[in-house]
Every structure is written in structure tokens, then in C-alpha cells.
Image: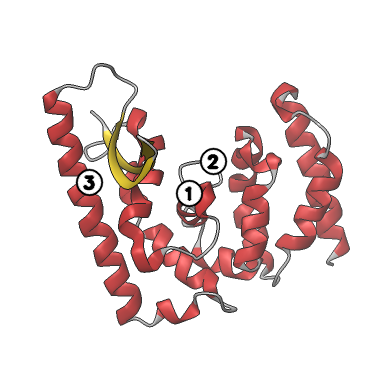
Amino acid sequence: MAVIVRESKVINNKTYYNLKVFKSDSFPITHSDEIEAEMLDNFLSREMSRIQKEVKDNGLHKLKGKNGVIKLWYYVGKNLLFIDNLQIIKPSDKKYVWQALWYHAKELIPGEAKTRAGTNRDHFIYCYNLAKYDEQFVFNAGTWHDWSDLFDSPVSNNYYFLEWFNEKSSLLKEKKIKNWLRVFLKNLRSEFQNKDMSFLRPEYIRNKCEKILESFNNSIK
């Protein structure tokens, strides 16, 4: 299968915008792949239109650029979880879908960070990742800026850290402490800065994180 994204290209010294480009790990792209890609693109268009209508209907669109915008992006993320449905999107195509969403996002575009579209720091990936956590846990932890800082951090790209963080989220949720994520992330950065985590053993990462959490827990008692 393939995914349709829109790109700008310069042809004969003239710039053409929003040209359809088929992205795939499989070559050549067959006619059947193109038909499936068009169907997926139509589906993404309908889904993004639906989400836009719903955030307008429930007033969440008014939070853009304001305090509390995390509620908007959490809602968007929850509605992007269809990306996990293997009957809709193949695992090999998933990495291209994020860029594809931007063309259809329209009023859901945050207004900044468009240069991140299709990268590991894509805005809609952050919404999707945020929605993997319990709603009250997310809102208690901090602001959208705090969560973005976590997702921006190299530590969040490490599978073993995310696995550990998911395990501990219930413990942190039980404490019902407001806006703790900023302080917690500061401690994480202090521990792992200037370290290439790809070479660190899982046991080492988990042990360090456990010590950070223990110290953090003691500091808020």
C-alpha cells in the first residue's frame, strides 16, 4: 500500500504547491496501491473534517493558543487512535500518515511547528502519544507545553523509558499532584543529558529512573 502526502516541488523554476506524492516502502507502487492510497486519503479527509466539526461543537477550538489548550490536543489525540487499526493503516505506512494529516487538518493546524510535519516531532504524533495516557493523569501532570517538552526530550524517544513511564503513571496519578511534570522532567534531563541512550542497557535506564522517581516522591511529601 501507499500513503498520499502533499509536497511543494520546483519544476522548471516554478514552484508547485500541494502536489500529490505517493509514499511507500514498497516499490514499484502498483495501480492497486494507488487506488488504496486514494481511499485512505479520502478516509483521512473525512476523519479530520469530523474532528474539526466536533471541536467546534464542543467549544474546544476556542482554546487554541490559550491556557488549557491541552484539553483540545488530548481530544484530537483520542480521535487519532484509529491509526492503530491495522485494518485501516498498515504498520509500514504509519510513519507517512502523520504528514498526510496536515493537508486535511486545516483549522486543527496549531499555527506553529509545521516544519515538523512528518518528523518524529510532529504535532499530531504528540497529540496521539498524549492520548495514550489517562485523561486526568495528563491534565494533573502539567500543561501542553510541559508535555511537549517531554516529547521533545531525547529521553522520550527511548523505548525503555516510555515503558517505565507507562508503568509508573498509575502511581503518579494516585498522588493527585498538580503540575509535577516540569520538575520531574528537569530531574530526568539532569541525569541523562549528554548521554546517548541508545547505548544504555535497559536495566541501567530503569534503575536511574527509579532513583529519580524516589527522590521526586520524597521531595513532595
Residue holding disc 3: 41
State the SS at label 3.
Answer: helix
Which label sits in the foreground, 3 or 1?
Answer: 3
Determine crowd level at label 3: few under 14, some 14-19, many 20+ residues with C-alpha closer than 10 A: many
Image coordinates for residue 154, horizontal then vertical, percent: 69, 40
Residue holding disc 1: 125
Label 2–label 3 contact, CB within 8 A: no
Please report the residue visible at 63 percent of the width from the left and 69 percent of the height from the top: 143
> What amino acid is labelled 2 in the image?
Asn
Q: Marks 3 and 1, how far apart in space?
A: 18 Å
Image coordinates for residue 24, horizontal then vertical, percent: 32, 27
State the SS at label 2.
Answer: loop
> Where, quadrant-wise, is the N terminus in this rendering?
top left
Which mark sits nearer the N-terminus, 1 or 2? 2
Q: Is residue 178 visible?
A: yes
Residue holding disc 2: 120
Rendered position, 142 above or below 169: below
Determine crowd level at label 2: few under 14, some 14-19, many 20+ residues with C-alpha closer than 10 A: some
> What amino acid is labelled 1 in the image?
Ile
> What amino acid is labelled 3 in the image?
Asp
Which mark sits nearer the N-terminus, 2 or 3? 3
**Lateral position of residue 149 relative to residue 89, left or right:** right
Pick the residue in front: 33 or 204: 33
> Which of the 4 quarters of the picture holds residue 208?
top right
Rendered position, 88 above or below 103: above
Label 3–label 1 contact, CB within 8 A: no
State the SS at label 1.
Answer: helix
Q: Marks 1 and 2, how far apart in space?
A: 7 Å
